[in-house]
Amino acid sequence: MITEPIGIFKAPTHFEMKIDLSRIVLKVCIPGEPQAWERAGRNGSRSFDTPANKAAKLTIRQYVMLANPRLKPDCQNRFGKIFLFATHKWNTDEDNYAKLVNDAVKGLVWKDDRQADESYVRVARGPNVIPQTQLIFYTLPLDLGGL
Protein backbone atom coordinates (compact mmCIF):
# COMPACT_ATOMS: atom_id res chain seq x y z
CA MET A 1 0.00 0.00 0.00
CA ILE A 2 1.32 3.43 -0.96
CA THR A 3 0.43 6.13 1.54
CA GLU A 4 1.18 9.77 2.13
CA PRO A 5 0.13 12.32 4.77
CA ILE A 6 -2.77 14.48 3.62
CA GLY A 7 -4.74 17.50 4.73
CA ILE A 8 -2.28 19.63 6.64
CA PHE A 9 -3.84 22.95 7.68
CA LYS A 10 -1.62 26.01 7.84
CA ALA A 11 -2.84 26.78 11.32
CA PRO A 12 -2.32 25.70 14.94
CA THR A 13 -4.37 22.57 14.12
CA HIS A 14 -2.55 19.59 12.56
CA PHE A 15 -4.32 16.68 10.92
CA GLU A 16 -2.65 13.69 9.33
CA MET A 17 -4.17 10.52 7.96
CA LYS A 18 -2.72 7.84 5.73
CA ILE A 19 -4.79 6.31 2.94
CA ASP A 20 -4.03 4.15 -0.07
CA LEU A 21 -3.15 6.59 -2.87
CA SER A 22 -4.18 4.15 -5.57
CA ARG A 23 -7.80 4.45 -4.40
CA ILE A 24 -8.02 8.26 -4.52
CA VAL A 25 -10.58 9.42 -7.09
CA LEU A 26 -10.36 13.14 -6.38
CA LYS A 27 -8.35 15.51 -4.21
CA VAL A 28 -9.16 19.23 -4.34
CA CYS A 29 -8.61 22.36 -2.23
CA ILE A 30 -11.14 25.18 -2.47
CA PRO A 31 -9.85 28.51 -1.13
CA GLY A 32 -12.10 30.87 0.78
CA GLU A 33 -14.56 30.69 3.66
CA PRO A 34 -16.54 27.42 3.55
CA GLN A 35 -20.31 27.67 3.24
CA ALA A 36 -22.47 25.55 5.54
CA TRP A 37 -25.72 24.12 4.15
CA GLU A 38 -28.71 26.28 5.00
CA ARG A 39 -32.14 24.79 5.56
CA ALA A 40 -34.03 24.85 2.29
CA GLY A 41 -37.59 26.11 2.07
CA ARG A 42 -40.82 24.70 0.70
CA ASN A 43 -43.37 26.14 -1.66
CA GLY A 44 -46.32 23.77 -1.42
CA SER A 45 -45.08 20.30 -2.32
CA ARG A 46 -41.90 21.62 -4.00
CA SER A 47 -38.73 22.26 -2.03
CA PHE A 48 -36.15 24.82 -3.06
CA ASP A 49 -32.53 25.62 -2.26
CA THR A 50 -31.42 28.95 -0.84
CA PRO A 51 -29.37 31.26 -3.10
CA ALA A 52 -26.36 30.81 -0.77
CA ASN A 53 -26.59 27.00 -1.09
CA LYS A 54 -26.87 27.23 -4.89
CA ALA A 55 -23.84 29.53 -5.15
CA ALA A 56 -21.70 27.39 -2.82
CA LYS A 57 -22.61 24.17 -4.64
CA LEU A 58 -21.74 25.76 -7.98
CA THR A 59 -18.33 26.85 -6.63
CA ILE A 60 -17.61 23.35 -5.30
CA ARG A 61 -18.68 21.76 -8.60
CA GLN A 62 -16.46 24.13 -10.59
CA TYR A 63 -13.39 23.32 -8.47
CA VAL A 64 -14.12 19.58 -8.70
CA MET A 65 -14.40 19.78 -12.50
CA LEU A 66 -11.19 21.83 -12.72
CA ALA A 67 -9.36 19.28 -10.55
CA ASN A 68 -10.49 16.37 -12.71
CA PRO A 69 -12.16 17.40 -16.00
CA ARG A 70 -12.67 13.76 -17.07
CA LEU A 71 -14.42 12.74 -13.86
CA LYS A 72 -17.58 10.72 -14.47
CA PRO A 73 -20.08 9.73 -11.77
CA ASP A 74 -19.35 6.24 -10.48
CA CYS A 75 -22.49 4.15 -9.96
CA GLN A 76 -20.83 0.94 -8.77
CA ASN A 77 -18.17 1.65 -6.14
CA ARG A 78 -18.58 2.48 -2.47
CA PHE A 79 -16.70 5.58 -1.33
CA GLY A 80 -14.82 7.03 1.56
CA LYS A 81 -14.44 10.75 1.98
CA ILE A 82 -12.37 13.16 3.97
CA PHE A 83 -13.65 16.72 4.32
CA LEU A 84 -11.43 19.30 6.01
CA PHE A 85 -12.82 22.78 6.60
CA ALA A 86 -10.93 25.79 7.96
CA THR A 87 -13.12 28.72 8.97
CA HIS A 88 -13.23 31.88 11.03
CA LYS A 89 -16.89 31.15 11.92
CA TRP A 90 -17.89 29.68 15.28
CA ASN A 91 -21.64 29.27 14.74
CA THR A 92 -21.74 26.51 12.08
CA ASP A 93 -22.13 22.73 12.39
CA GLU A 94 -19.68 20.33 10.78
CA ASP A 95 -22.54 18.20 9.44
CA ASN A 96 -23.95 21.20 7.54
CA TYR A 97 -20.58 21.76 5.84
CA ALA A 98 -20.48 18.08 4.86
CA LYS A 99 -24.12 18.02 3.66
CA LEU A 100 -23.48 20.89 1.26
CA VAL A 101 -20.43 19.10 -0.22
CA ASN A 102 -22.30 15.79 -0.49
CA ASP A 103 -25.12 17.52 -2.39
CA ALA A 104 -22.69 19.46 -4.60
CA VAL A 105 -20.76 16.41 -5.87
CA LYS A 106 -23.85 14.34 -6.63
CA GLY A 107 -23.61 13.42 -10.30
CA LEU A 108 -19.89 14.25 -10.41
CA VAL A 109 -18.13 11.83 -8.04
CA TRP A 110 -20.98 9.44 -7.35
CA LYS A 111 -24.54 8.93 -8.49
CA ASP A 112 -25.86 9.42 -4.95
CA ASP A 113 -24.24 10.12 -1.57
CA ARG A 114 -25.71 6.86 -0.26
CA GLN A 115 -22.63 5.32 -1.92
CA ALA A 116 -20.44 6.85 0.83
CA ASP A 117 -19.77 4.32 3.58
CA GLU A 118 -16.78 5.92 5.29
CA SER A 119 -16.42 9.52 6.34
CA TYR A 120 -14.10 11.83 8.24
CA VAL A 121 -15.03 15.48 8.74
CA ARG A 122 -12.86 17.99 10.56
CA VAL A 123 -13.41 21.71 11.13
CA ALA A 124 -10.54 23.94 12.24
CA ARG A 125 -11.79 27.25 13.63
CA GLY A 126 -10.12 30.43 14.70
CA PRO A 127 -8.54 33.68 13.63
CA ASN A 128 -5.27 32.03 12.55
CA VAL A 129 -6.67 29.52 10.04
CA ILE A 130 -6.58 30.14 6.31
CA PRO A 131 -10.23 29.65 5.23
CA GLN A 132 -10.49 26.72 2.84
CA THR A 133 -12.16 23.42 2.09
CA GLN A 134 -10.12 20.29 1.35
CA LEU A 135 -11.95 17.33 -0.20
CA ILE A 136 -10.63 13.84 -0.77
CA PHE A 137 -12.75 11.05 -2.24
CA TYR A 138 -11.53 7.47 -2.52
CA THR A 139 -13.02 4.11 -3.40
CA LEU A 140 -13.35 1.46 -0.72
CA PRO A 141 -12.19 -2.11 -1.23
CA LEU A 142 -14.95 -4.60 -1.90
CA ASP A 143 -16.14 -6.13 1.36
CA LEU A 144 -18.17 -9.30 1.04
CA GLY A 145 -18.95 -9.37 4.75
CA GLY A 146 -16.89 -12.46 5.54
CA LEU A 147 -18.20 -14.48 2.57
Image (cartoon, grey):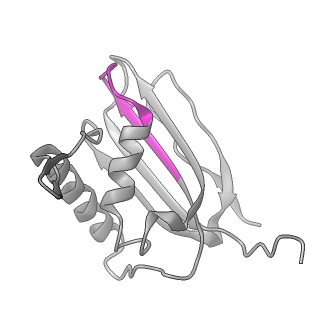
116 to 56, vertically: above or below: below
Is residue 137 highlighted in magenta?
no
Is residue 50 found left or right of 6 in the rendered image? left
Q: Is residue 29 visible?
A: no
Q: State left or right for residue 19 relative to residue 74.
A: right
* Front residue of 107 and 83: 107
Report the residue at 39% width, 82% height from top.
72
Q: Name the residue located 83 percent from the left edge and 70 percent from the top edge.
A: 145
Examine the rendered structure and indicate whether residue 106 appears above or below residue 38: below
Looking at this view, is 132 or 120 the one in front?
120
State which region is magenta: 82-94
User: Outermost residue, right direction?
Assistant: 146
The residue drawn where x is 73% and y is 76% is 142
The residue at the point 43 percent across, 69 percent down is 112
Name the residue nearer the viewer: 45 or 85.
45
**With respect to residue 57, does 107 lie above or below?**
below
Residue 103 in view of the camera: yes
| Quarter residue 139 falls in | bottom right
Q: In the image, 104: left or right of 137?
A: left
- Coordinates of residue 25 in the picture (x, y in percent): 51, 71
Q: Residue furthest front?
A: 44
